[in-house]
Image (cartoon, rainbow, N blue to C red):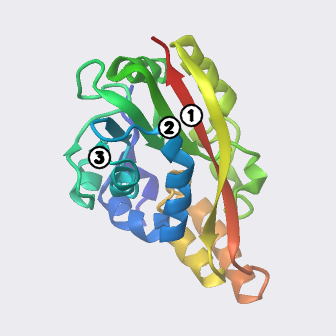
Amino acid sequence: MADRATDIRRRSGSLMTYGPAMAAAYDRGRRLREGDVERWMVAARPYLPSGAGWILDLGAGTGRFSDALAAISGASVVACEPSADMRAVLRANVPVVGGTGEAIPFGAGVFDAVWASQMIHHVGDLPGFAAELRRVLRPAGRVLIRGGFGPVQEIPLYRYFPSAWADGTAARLGLDRITEVLTAAGFATVECLQVEQTFVADADEFVEKAASRSLSPLAALPDQAFEDGLAALRRDAAEGRVTGPIVERLDLVVFRAGP
């Protein structure tokens, strides 16, 4: 079997790019329940523009949040995704463009807010990313970063795939480093809060989600490490050592651009 990691291509100074297999698996493994999306939007709403405002969904994937951002705010939303394969399966009623976090294809001062969901660990040049955010945002514009920045032991998959979150891997990018870089670029921290969502309802869904290998830390593992972890998860599920529902808590961190 060809190494699944070859389906993820890292380009210097750009967001990680997903190939066809990852794009096809993305919705199977990354689907969010309607109630979970609503919780994220309720948390985000105070920091989003409305009416004539503009929001950039950066690293939009298959557009999981694009329509929800438009619906909750009434603002115009643009989805920006670097992978052509992901854009081909992006399902949202918003304009879609290709572009990376370090080369956002818009002029200066266009957006009132940037939504960046579980994409910042793909950024190869954080200072360049921060500079681009500052450039495309209007004064006092907001950056809303969604991700998991707590202890790795709290990640449901960590027990079976610990090397996916090993020290030095992109998945271990910490909030302290993100805050340091954005502060240096002229951003101020506004809020840091946690939102609960259902990771899986039961053991069968846990196995199915892991087997899709749609999370980039899993896709980046050598195939043997992935297969060993998946086999251990399947054994625990079959023997009743995995029960559901499993609820996870992810972070929403909000930054404000200076004048």
Instruction: State whether residue 65 is above or below residue 55.
Output: below
Judged from the image, the secondary structure of the residue bearing numbered disc 3 is loop
- The residue to which callout 2 is attached is 47
Q: Residues within 10 Å of mark 3 (few under 14, many from 20)?
A: many
Residue 164 image offset from top left, x and y in percent: 63, 51
Q: Secondary structure at mark 2?
A: helix
Determine the CA span between mark 2 and mark 1.
8 Å
Image disc number at residue 83: 3
Q: Which mark is residue 254?
A: 1
Quarter containing the C terminus: top left
- Residue 65: which quarter of the image? bottom left
Image side of residue 44 versus residue 58, left or right:
right
Q: Are marks 2 and 1 in contact (CB under 8 Å)?
A: yes
Residue at image point 61% right, 75% down: 206
Q: Earlier in the sequence, mark 2 or mark 3?
A: 2
Residue 233 at x, y percent in the picture: 68, 74
